[in-house]
Amino acid sequence: MENAGKEDMPEDAERQGLGTPATRAAMIEKLLSAGFVERKGKSLVPTKDGINLAVILPDMLKSPLLTAEWETRLTEIAKGCDDPQSFMQGIEDMTRELVKRYSHITEDGKKLFAPEKEAVGICPRCKSPVYEGKKNFYCSDRSCRFVMWKNDKFFESRRTVFSKKIAAALLKDGKAKVKGLYSERTGKTYDGTVLLCDTGEKYVNYRIEQRK
């Protein structure tokens, strides 16, 4: 941070970098606590949110030239050659304009900060991540069309909730051990192993592994 934007600073700027040594430590702690950077050894590395924040911020706020301009004016104010009220008025005017123009994040911007979904498993067809939806477990590659529906008749007829745990096992091993499966023939429950039988068609099939 001490040398940030050094090449863009005017030669007559009294200080270079972002802030003073006293304020830089506080700025770093704020960035760390907000989750925009993280420490790796002796280095500070931007997180995904930190990179995305830099993407959506107005160019004016990202440019070290703004810091250079402020540092130059502060130096002139300290020398009695500039008006502090005029300086503060300029900051207030700039803030109002920024709030007016950027009061809402675009839909694309919101997507950047959406929490990352935890994959349930890997698609058996295209090897893309499979995520959980309200009604199904779906492949993240929509062109693949692999989907396992939670209300599948196979599980409903056996009075079994098609849980995330079952889905994860099916995706990982192609089978899942399930307790309390209902038998319409006997009217009783039993423990069995459900097999994933994907033929690549629109709907995924399942069957019970036969005991040997």
Image (cartoon, rainbow, N blue to C red):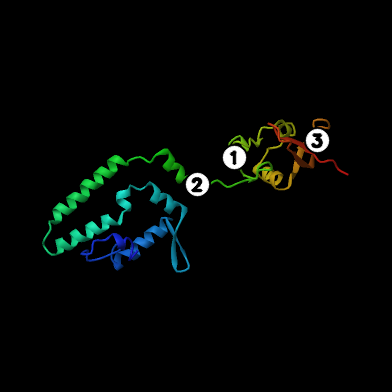
The percent position of residue 130, horizontal first and vertical second, equals 62, 43
The image quarter containing residue 4 is bottom left
Residue at left offset 79%, top offset 42%: 191
> Please, what secondary structure does the residue beneath circle 1 have?
loop
- Please tell me whether mark 1 or mark 3 is closer to you in this view: 1
Spatial CA distance of label 3 from label 2 is 43 Å
Which label number is shown at residue 141? Answer: 1
The percent position of residue 66, horizontal first and vertical second, equals 26, 55
Answer with left or right where residue 89 lies relative to residue 157: left
Spatial CA distance of label 1 from label 2 is 18 Å
Which residue is denoted by mark 3 in the rendering? 188
Q: Earlier in the sequence, mark 3 or mark 2?
A: 2
Label 3: few (<14), some or many (≥20) within 10 Å? few
Position above or below: 174 against 81: above
Which label number is shown at residue 2? Answer: none
Which residue is denoted by mark 2 in the rendering? 115
> Please, what secondary structure does the residue beneath circle 2 have?
loop
The percent position of residue 122, horizontal first and vertical second, equals 65, 46
Q: Earlier in the sequence, mark 1 or mark 3?
A: 1
| Tag 3: amino acid | Lys
Q: Quadrant of the C terminus?
A: top right
Residue at left offset 18%, top offset 53%: 88
| Tag 2: amino acid | Pro
Does the CB distance between marks 1 and 2 fall below 8 Å?
no
> Please, what secondary structure does the residue beneath circle 3 have?
loop
Label 1: few (<14), some or many (≥20) within 10 Å? some
The percent position of residue 178, horizontal first and vertical second, equals 74, 43
Spatial CA distance of label 1 from label 3 is 40 Å
Answer with left or right where residue 24 lies relative to residue 112: left
Tally of numbered discs? 3
Residue at left offset 21%, top offset 46%: 93
- Please tell me whether mark 1 or mark 2 is closer to you in this view: 1
